[in-house]
Amino acid sequence: MNRYLSVVILLLVSGLAQAHHSTLGFFNPEERAELEGVLTNITWRNPHIRFTMDVTAADGTTEEWKIEASALSVLKQRGLDQRFMKPGDQIKIYGHPSRHGEPEMWARNVLLPNGTEVLVATRSEAYFTVSTDGELLDSVFDDQIAENARASADGIFRVWSTVLNDRDSFPMFKGDYPLTAEAAQIKADWNPSSDQLLSCWEKGMPILMITPIPLEITRRGDDIVIVFEEDDTEREIHMNDDSPPEESSFLGYSRGHWDGDTLVIETTNINAPDFDDRGTPQTDNIQTTERLSLSEDEQRLNYSIAFNDPETFTEPFELNRYFIWRPEIAIGEWDCENQMDRI
């Protein structure tokens, strides 16, 4: 164990296993640790925030540590200003150390010099301030964004967000799928350290729908478009076209219709190789059926997606999640920086 760390071994799999982009190849979800040092540099980018700290040991020697945290977009959802910490600050980190003994950590919580705590992982809870008089960093949102959103909201057509600490909302993909023997072997052989999802590589269907990052449902003529902040992706739902093209794509070809107040989307022609971010494969024969419906108070969007891919799954099955409307949240730029250089 690295001499700079005081590590607490946990028996439960932590929130790292639900990190949006797979980090299991680098950080140990079964260990948590505290780290204290001086912040030397920070990069506010997607898919993960990255910063460095100078950590001083008891013998006076100093070592540079590399820290990663959730996407910048996750912090924006929490209303956290990027200026909450700056180089030169003496901070504490609570998170998951490297699997390989490297001076690296996945951060869940940051304690600022003034005793304020910041939650920097998708499923973080207060840690440093539980037994102190400290407080969590206040959220700050633009009132004008909320006012504009309330004026323009129309049924499902608005920006939808994720409840990060509710497993019924995120993550949607939790494993235990009815895999064929061949698919199970591919998953078993998967190496998380070579996960393309750590890069700015385009996500496909259905993995794009796992996103904890805001999405917006809009109209484009007779069609419907789902605009994702993640990857700056647009997914078009064809409402009056029953003739899919011969070619395939990562997002596939989606046809939609209304079943009463429920939007039903059927998608084929998907050639994305990844079903989820845990090594589960899929074939280009996969077909999905999605159903999106508003709650009675129009504050929640209920979402289900059914899968049929006989070469991957022994039987069709369905997953569910929900989104919530937070009028203070707007779609932003993804501004992604590749992180495959760490492999």
Image: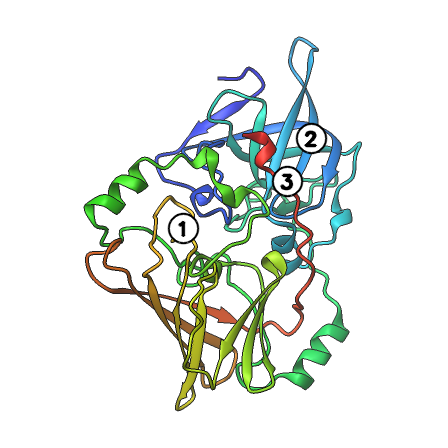
Circle nearer the viewer, 3 or 2: 2
Image quarter hosting the C terminus: top right
Residue type (three-letter) at the residue carrying disc 1: Asp
Residue 13, image quadrant: top left
Instruction: Tell me the distance, in whole angstroms, between the alpha carbons under discs 3 and 1.
Output: 33 Å
Return the residue nearer the eye: 197 or 298: 197
Label 1's element? Answer: loop
Residue type (three-letter) at the residue carrying disc 3: Val
Residue 39, image quadrant: top right
Label 3's element? Answer: strand
Q: Which mark is residue 110?
A: 3
**190 with respect to 43 (left or right):** left
Residue 228 is situated, as x and y percent measured from the top left of the image, at 58, 64
Circle nearer the viewer, 2 or 1: 1
Residue at x 33%, y 66% (from the top left corner): 287
Return the residue nearer the eye: 193 or 58: 193
